[in-house]
Structure formats: C-alpha cells, structure tokens
Amino acid sequence: MDRHIVLIGMMGAGKTAVGGELARRLGARFIDSDNEIESAAAMTIAEIFARDGEEFFRMRESEVLRRLLAAPPSVISTGGGAWLRGENRDLIRRNGLSVWLNVELETLWNRVRMRSTRPLLKTADPKGTLTQMLESRRPHYSTAELVFDVRGGDSIDQTASRLLTQ
Ligand code: S3P
C-alpha cells in the first residue's frame, strides 16, 4: 500500500467494521480515529462532548488525523464529522484515498438506534436529526475520491470484497 485508505461517511455506515476487515486482508495497520481520541483523552467521545463540547472534540479529531496521516500507510476509519472540516479533507486528499461508504438512511438508522453512545443523536427526534445530517453532509461526502455504494443486506465481508475489486 502506497497511501492511506481513509473511510468516511455517516455514523452507522460501518466504517470501523469494514476498515478492520480491509486492513486484515491488506495486511495493513487499522486505526479508528474515534478510538485514538478516546485513548488519548482517557474519556469516551460522549464524555468529551459533555465536558468540553463539540468544538474541542473537533480540534482533537484534526490533531489525531494529522498524526495518523503523517505515519506509514494504514487503513483509517474516521468519525462521521471528520470530512466536513476543510483542513481534514485537504490532509486526507494529500495523503490517502478517501472512500465514502454510502449507506441508505434506513440502514444507518437501524444500526444507530440500538446504541445511545452518539452525542449528536441525543435529541428529541434522533431519526429526524440523522435524516437532516445525511442530507446536509451528502454533498460533502460525495466529493470523496471513491464513492462506494454499500449494498443493503451485504455483510462486512461482502462489502470488503466488493471494495477491494473497485
Ligand atoms: C460523529 C460521529 C462519531 C463521533 C462523534 C461525531 C459525527 O463517529 O466521531 O460522535 O459528527 O458524525 P462515528 O461516525 O464513528 O459514529
């Protein structure tokens, strides 16, 4: 691998699961940027949002991405908001292949509704929030170098196989 593979896209798109599988098959290192932020801070993402706010989290996220992208090529899964910052996008474009895991809304919702760890979905109408988030983020995600439409019903293995034949 001569450059990083950076997975972007919504919460629940499967970036972490697919990224781990891709890395395994490629014999590459796998890193999840949210996990990196959590271990550096010794706090969960939810705790960071609650204690220090989203802007603080976004600064930590950009720092982690700078560090990861300066290291030897790896497979990196990013948090859903990482691609929305211009500085992150520039850095990712310069150092890696950006891949948008494009997953339809109902699938995203079915995955995230079970887990209450995402601070941005702690609203009175989480499905409405997710819907609006997807609508406003889609134009940005679609500027990824590779737009990969994940087939509904495909497993992690099937998704990784299809991605590797792109
Ligand atoms: C966020 C997505 C989360 C995490 C944080 C913010 C977002 O990561 O970074 O809660 O803005 O979409 P996942 O996409 O891995 O859930």
Image (cartoon, rainbow, N blue to C red):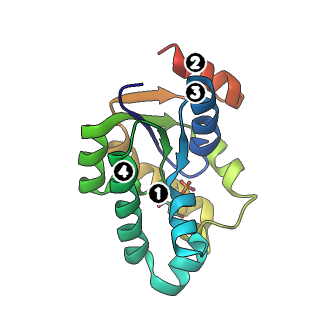
Query: Residue at the spot x=50%, y=36% of the render?
Result: 101
Frontmost residue, 13 versus 157: 157
Mark 1, residue position: 132
**In the image, residue 119 lies at what x, y percent?**
57, 71
Q: Are circles 2 and 3 on residues that touch, CB within 8 Å?
A: no
**At 56% from the left edge and 42% from the top edge, which residue is drawn?**
15
Q: Is residue 80 left or right of residue 119?
A: left
Residue 25 location, x and y as percent?
Answer: 61, 24
Residue extending furthest toward the top: 165
Question: Does the image show residue 14?
Answer: yes
Which residue corresponds to the image point at 30% horizontal and 57% vertical from the top-left? 85
| Mark 4 vs 3: CB contact within 8 A | no
Ligand 1 within 8 Å of disc 2? The answer is no
Q: Relative to 10, is 145 on the left or the right?
A: left
According to the picture, the residue beneath numbered tag 2 turns out to be 162
Q: Residues within 10 Å of mark 2 (few under 14, many from 20)?
A: some
Looking at the image, tell me whether mark 4 or mark 3 is earlier in sequence order. 3
* Residue identifier under label 4: 83
Label 2, label 4: how far apart the Cα atoms are: 23 Å
**Residue 53 location, quadrant:** bottom left
**How far is mark 1 from mark 2, CA to CA?**
29 Å
Disc 1 and disc 2 in contact, CB within 8 angstroms: no
Distance (Cα) linking label 3 and label 1:
37 Å
Measured from the top left, where is residue 151 in percent x and y?
61, 26
Q: Which residue matches tag 3? A: 27
Position of residue 150 measured from the top left corner of the image (x, y, whole percent)? 57, 29
Amino acid type assigned to the residue bearing label 1 in the image? Gln
